[in-house]
Amino acid sequence: MNGKGFSLLAASGGLPALLVAAVLVIAAAVPAPFVTAQQAAPADTAKIPPDQLDSLVAPIALYPDPLLAQVLAASTYPIEIVELQQWLTKNSGLKDKALTDAVEQQPWDASVQALAGMPDVVKRLSDDIQWTTNLGNAFLAQQSDVMAAVQRMRSKAKGNGNLESTPQQVVQTKTVENQQVIVIEQANPQVVYVPSYNPTVVYGPPVYPYPPVYYPPPPPPGSLAISFGIGMAMGAMMSGGWGYNCGWGHSNTVVINNNNTYINNQNVRTGNRNVNNNWQHNAAHRGGTPYPNAATADRFGGTTRGASAANRQANAQQQLGRQGGSVSDRSAAGGGGAARQGGSVSDRSAAGGGGAARQGGSVSDRSSAAVAGAGRSGGGGQDRIGSRDLSGSSGRDQRSGLGGGSDGFSGARAQEMSSRGASSRGGRSSGGGRRR
């Protein structure tokens, strides 16, 4: 088998490749307690500097608040995002209620399930999975700092005259907990538009390089700096209202709406209901992706890229032990099931679901084997998913720390944010854009 696609366990020379694939396939199914991301940071934990956080959030900082919050939550589960993208490709004929019902049967986190109604957003997150993973890592480690970075970038765009209310969205400056914040909401609560923009145009030149992901070309002179595709109407995908929103103010956190169909179904399935409405990371859906540092890994019961081979092997063996030595076969429709041949995991276990590369081909241009933490042979940190180099162009090793904060989610607010959405990212397939 091609060891280039294997996870860190295989790269360490420890567990056999097939066992590694098995561990990563079942990782999302292993029961684990919900752990809040609002805990204090150890004093010795180095944080990602503000200018790097600003650049990291630049591609999504101008999204409507509910969509921004959901993307931040979902980014902490990169393997499941890739699985969702593969699943949507295989099930492109499903729409509305049929799509909702089918997605509910998949074993993904509610934040990932709810993205199924926004295929263009899913494609962006999946295509640029290294940036997505870095975003999720930063959000887990420095949640309040990431939210503050969003506000700084919105202020830059507004100061440049590039963030104003449009027929698609309403931009307002509000005072929340004695702090002024810029809030972006849908102009029509029943329809959501995903903005498309070039960060250099809307924010200006970066202090730290913007992530090397797709951006549309600069608009012609006199044109708006932000464009919108086709709005997506609310439907079955957002039954019960949007599931996520931004809790601005001193807390700077993400809050949830327990009435949302996916969150409610997850609550029923797990028997857990988040009574204070603060978003909580569920480590059971992490799927083997390394955490950014030891402090974060310790909180969520995972490992880091720098963990010793012995620790990684022990963690994998413990997960297998919890399953009684067997591997659950996640359906191929989910994009993440390990193919079984005679009851054993196939050598071609779906890299999209577990971290083992296919023989003779990758699951996608950015295989989930990389998402699960496989470093490329002879490659530097920026070649590996979960790399601490946020821009992909700097050799500096920036380690994340922990953020904090909490907030509530009022019932009235939950009813306001009832929508479903996705839109074209404005010419992504046109070939006119470029990667930075």
Image (cartoon, helix red, strand yellow):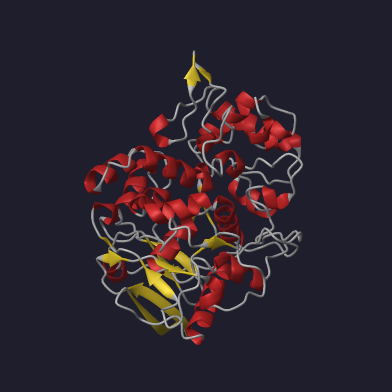
Measured as percent of width and height from the top left, residue 203 is found at 54, 78
Residue 46 placement, left or right of 371: right
Q: Quadrant of residue 4?
A: top right
The quadrant of the picture occupied by the N terminus is top right
Measured as percent of width and height from the top left, residue 402 is found at 63, 62
- Looking at the image, is 60 positioned above or below residue 21? below
Name the residue nearer the viewer: 322 or 228. Answer: 228
Which residue appears at 59% of the width and 40% of the height? 288
Name the residue nearer the viewer: 124 or 42. Answer: 124
The quadrant of the picture occupied by the C terminus is bottom right
Q: Is residue 38 visible?
A: no
- The number of numbered badges drawn on the structure is 0
Measured as percent of width and height from the top left, residue 385 is found at 63, 48
Name the residue nearer the viewer: 328 or 225. Answer: 225
Residue 323 placement, left or right of 308: left
Which residue appears at 68% of the width and 54% of the height? 295
Q: Is residue 339 visible?
A: yes
Which residue appears at 42% of the width and 49% of the height? 112
